[in-house]
Amino acid sequence: MGSTVGHGEVVLGHGEVVLGHGEVVLGHGEVVLGHGEVVLGHGEVVLGHGEVVLGHGEVVLGHGEVVLLVLERVISYECCPGYEKLPGEKGCPAALPLVNIYNTLGMVGAATTKMYSERAQLREEIEGPGSFTFFAPSNEAWAALPNEILDALVSNVNIELLNALHYHMIVTVNCARLVKTDQHATNGIVHVVDRVITAVTNDVHTFIDTDDDLETLRTAVAAAGLTQMLESDGHYTVFAPTNEAFNKIPPEMLNRILGDPVALKDLLNYHILKNMQCAESITSGTPLETLQGTVLEVGCDGADMTLNGKAIIQKKDQLGTNGVIHYINELLIPDSEGVTMSGELKKLLKNHILKEQLSSRSLYHGQELETLGGIKLRVFVYRNSLCIENSCIAAHDKTGRFGSMFTVDKVLTPPMGTIMDVLKADNRFSLLVGAIQTAGMTELMNQAGPHTVFAPTNDAFSALPKADLNKLMGNPQELASLLKYHMAKEILVSGGVGSHTRLKPLQGEKLELNMKNQTVYVNKVPVVEADLMATNGVVHAVGAIITPLPPKVDREQADAPISSMRTDSRIAVKNDDLFQKVRKSLSSRTMTRVQ
């Protein structure tokens, strides 16, 4: 007799079980399904017509035939973020240009973080210039967060983000530090400061003129002709030597200094900064430029402010209408002794010295750095290099007490004029300048940029058959297409070129760049001189007209007669007869020369 189990199952006399849907579990683990199929204990299936499907995918038919089911596994690979495949190449050798943090979030599996960044009004910060480290939660990390925590974060995200952005920021008013801000009341807002703010009525010179402790300084200021400047509008910081400071100088030396207006003015200007610096707003170790042209390092030693490493400040933050005075008990002596050098060499060296102390970690793409020579240098960040104008950092920083040193791989050449100015100033590009004017691209070459131009020299144009060159110069539209294939809308200096670098021109397919034996090649055309820096980009001189590369399968036949090569139907540069004629006239010579 059988017995009925709780949910409609029936246990038969020999241990079989009839399930609610008609399946039968036999005593040895076999299962008879509702349509007559039998699942055996080891995973084999006996179908209703006698076929047997074994555990590894074989099918035994009723007459003993065996059919093997071959299951083909397909494995696909994706490139890592920042890289892409090249036709005919293994892996993902091509490095894509870097993008800002906001766009990078979507590329690295952090789309949710990207969404919340925009919601928190952080997008402008992480799209713009800066040097950030972003610990971005993955999409899975957000999904794993309990709903109540996520709801709390999202509902308060703007407030929390605002607090985070202002954390560690110091704000001052009349040199008093704000220690608690935005305390709302029914009739206004309260900011808590760390000292009593008094009315400011006197200028900086009045302080010097009325304080007996600054009597010698008062005489020196008058003798140096600085009275009018310190009475006029401005934002000066004066490190005022007291009488005690002057008394530390031997009398004969002091009299000699006071009797030489030029030396005295130079000395006093070394005690005056170009802008106003309250004690609370100074970052320790920051070099600050003086009116004399050199820098002072302002720091701290415990609770004391220091100048060039010495705790000589007696009284600080004496506020005037045109600046602030800090009293010091020791005279600051500028180090003006140096070697004699030409004006050009001095100018060159000044443009290798920045006005502030930085580390390479604080540099970011597009940043501008001001030199002692008054020139602004641009920072370019590439996947494997960090460059300042044409020169790339070649070793780790060396940081000292008063500054940092970057070891660079070549002499810096600051930009001088626009791309068009650079081309006009070099006789090698006279034919190119004429071509640009004919094509109506002069304005483009003078625009703000950024641009990279691979500039064919006169020799490159002269290598064309004369008839083809004349015909090309007589066709402005076709000429513009050719020139735009030599131009990209970003700045790429030679130090940013890797083994497989690709650059999108203004018209046409991507250019392929690589470095070989310290020479840059563009579509296998060598760059004869790299990194002619312009204010709106960079110019690289090339010795041949650059043409699109053939497909990978045809490149192996580059040494074959040109008639055997087929025109690439994918060429995006304007594909009319004239351009192809120019291409064919150059391809065999250009490619065989650089093999």
Image: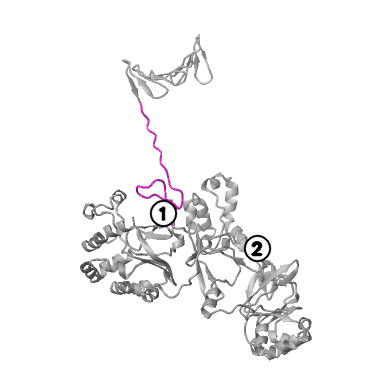
Q: Residue 92: within the magenta?
A: yes
Q: Is residue 157 above or below residue 241?
A: above
Q: Can residue 414 be seen?
A: yes
Position of residue 191 measured from the top left corner of the image (x, y, whole percent): 68, 69
| Quadrant of the rendered image containing residue 31 | top left
Q: Please indicate whether residue 205 sits to the left or right of residue 553 in the image.
A: right
The nearer-to-camera label among 1 and 2 is 1
Question: In the rendered image, which residue does mark 2 sit on?
Answer: 168
Q: Please indicate whether residue 120 sits to the left or right of residue 276 in the image.
A: left
Q: Residue at x 76, y 81 (%)?
A: 245
Disc 2 residue type? His
Q: Residue at x 60, y 78 (%)?
A: 339
Q: Residue 94: within the magenta?
A: yes
Position of residue 197 measured from the top left corner of the image (x, y, whole percent): 72, 76
Disc 2 residue crowd, few under 14, some 14–19, many 20+, Cα 10 Å: few
Q: Of residues 94 and 23, which is closer to you in this image?
A: 94
Question: In the rendered image, which residue does mark 1 sit on?
Answer: 500
Q: Which residues are magenta?
A: 69-96
Q: Of residues 479 and 248, which is closer to you in this image?
A: 248
